[in-house]
Amino acid sequence: MYANSKKAMLLQAAARIVRRDGVSKLTQDALAEEAGVSKGGVLYHFPSKYALIAALAEERIARFEGRIEGFSSEDGQEDGRWTRAYAQASAEPQEDGDPSVGLMAAAASDPAVMERIRARFGEWQSRAEADGIDDATATLLRLAADGLWLTEMLGLASPKGELRERVVARMLELAQSAKRV
């Protein structure tokens, strides 16, 4: 999203803070210290904590969409391609200490950030519905992928090991065998 820029470096440092200390410890002062820059340098890119959290949420979404695009480009079948790519991207193991939990908590308390996230999910739902397969099946798969990601992110009894692999494989089988619209 902000490849090789100071803004990207600051967002990486912000993600480290959220992973290590939680979103409540993400301040402009803490970010300046973590990134080894002046507070003025942080303020230039992120004039408020809201702007910082919003940018970090956008960066995480952009990463996810990049993974979707990567899986989609590897898929040789047109119908259901986006749905399969979404399921694969959602099913990728989360990095240890993924800051998404903290970001979701911060977003839930900020209506403007939450609205941006809702809009993205709305776009993804529209993509699923227009993916060339039965829209109910595509929606079911999107919701299953979201559920897998959310239960893993929050530590809510998500499937592990071989069962997880079978669940993901079954999601992809459903997307592969879904009837064309």
Image (cartoon, rainbow, N blue to C red):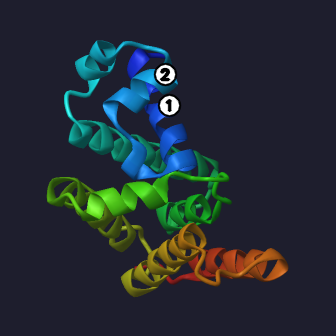
First in sequence: mark 2 or mark 1?
Answer: 1
Please state which of residues 169 and 44 is positioned toward the viewer in this rendering.
44
Please state which of residues 81 and 103 is positioned toward the viewer in this rendering.
103
Query: Disc 2 on helix, strand or loop?
Result: helix
Kind of residue sitting beneath label 1: Ala
Kind of residue sitting beneath label 2: Ala
- Per the model, the C-alpha gap separating discs 2 and 1 is 6 Å
Q: Is residue 132 left or right of residue 51?
A: right
Q: Would you call the spot at circle 1 few (<14 residues within 10 Å), some (14-19), or many (20 or more)?
A: many
Q: Position of residue 176 (x, y in %)?
A: 62, 75
Q: Residue at x 43, y 57 (%)?
A: 102
Q: Locate the C terminus and report the quarter of the image it occupies.
A: bottom left
Please state which of residues 15 and 131 is positioned toward the viewer in this rendering.
15
Q: Is residue 51 left or right of residue 139?
A: left
Q: Position of residue 154 (x, y in %)?
A: 54, 72
Tag shown at residue 35 = 2
- Disc 2 vs disc 1: Cβ atoms closer than 8 Å? yes
Q: Residue at x 50, y 51 (%)?
A: 99
Residue 149 against residue 40 in the figure, above or below: below
Residue 139 against residue 108 in the figure, above or below: below
Query: Disc 1 on helix, strand or loop?
Result: helix
Tag shown at residue 13 = 1
Residue 80 against residue 50 in the figure, above or below: below
Q: Residue furthest left?
A: 112
